[in-house]
Image (cartoon, rainbow, N blue to C red):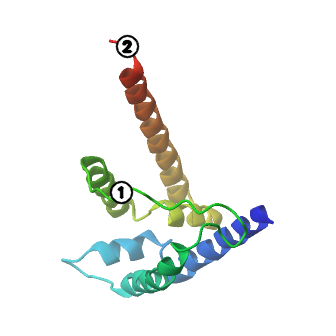
């Protein structure tokens, strides 16, 4: 049941991304072009997501288990640190250069084409590089002096 619900949630999310235009890099880049031919339509998509999140999050934080009985794992970090800022900047620059972020890139794979595939491969390489750097950092921290 958990796998089915995860699949259904993923399909619903992907369809929403496709229908909203977030899988079209030119639409995303038009939204990000504040100084040029700005396309505000994705602001409504994001506004809708913020509205749903702001209405449901207060209910979610009161729960200890999900609807399917899984433990709720909510973020505990409250500090804005250098890693968070650099990660956000890296994400934003990548989104601005490619017109994709991870969710829409995955949904775009279903539509075919070389650009989403290249982005997906680059995304996986970036994730692997991050994991390698984290592993090396943790290894150097635990190594006896």
Residue placed at 81% from the left, 66% from the top?
Answer: 1
* Residue 29 x %, y %: 34, 71
Judged from the image, the secondary structure of the residue bearing numbered disc 1 is helix
Residue placed at 32% from the left, 57% from the top?
Answer: 88
- Disc sitting over residue 70 in the figure: none
* Residue 12 x %, y %: 65, 76
Left or right: residue 103 compared with residue 98: right
Q: In which quarter of the image is residue 138?
A: top left
| Residue 75 sits above or below residue 50 on the image | above
Q: How far is mark 2 from mark 1, CA to CA?
A: 35 Å
Between disc 2 and disc 1, the foreground one is: 2
| Residue 37 sits above or below residue 1 on the image | below
Residue placed at 50% from the left, 51% from the top?
Answer: 118
* Residue 35 x %, y %: 18, 77
Quarter of the image where the C terminus is located: top left
Judged from the image, the secondary structure of the residue bearing numbered disc 2 is loop
Kindly identify which residue carries mark 2: 144
**Foreground residue, 60 or 21?**
60
């Amino acid at each position: 049941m958990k796998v089915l619900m995860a699949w259904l949630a993923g399909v619903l999310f992907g369809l929403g991304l496709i229908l909203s235009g977030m899988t079209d890099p030119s639409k995303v880049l038009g939204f990000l072009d504040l100084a040029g031919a700005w396309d505000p339509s994705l602001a409504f998509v994001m506004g809708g997501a913020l509205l749903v999140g702001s209405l449901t999050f207060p209910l979610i934080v009161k729960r200890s288990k999900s609807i399917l009985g899984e433990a709720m794992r909510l973020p505990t970090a409250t500090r804005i640190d250098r890693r968070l800022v650099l990660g956000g900047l890296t994400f934003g620059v990548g989104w601005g250069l490619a017109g994709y972020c991870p969710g829409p890139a995955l949904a775009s794979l279903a539509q075919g084409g070389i650009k989403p595939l290249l982005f997906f491969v680059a995304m996986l390489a970036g994730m692997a590089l991050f994991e390698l750097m984290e592993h090396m950092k943790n290894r150097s921290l635990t190594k006896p002096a």
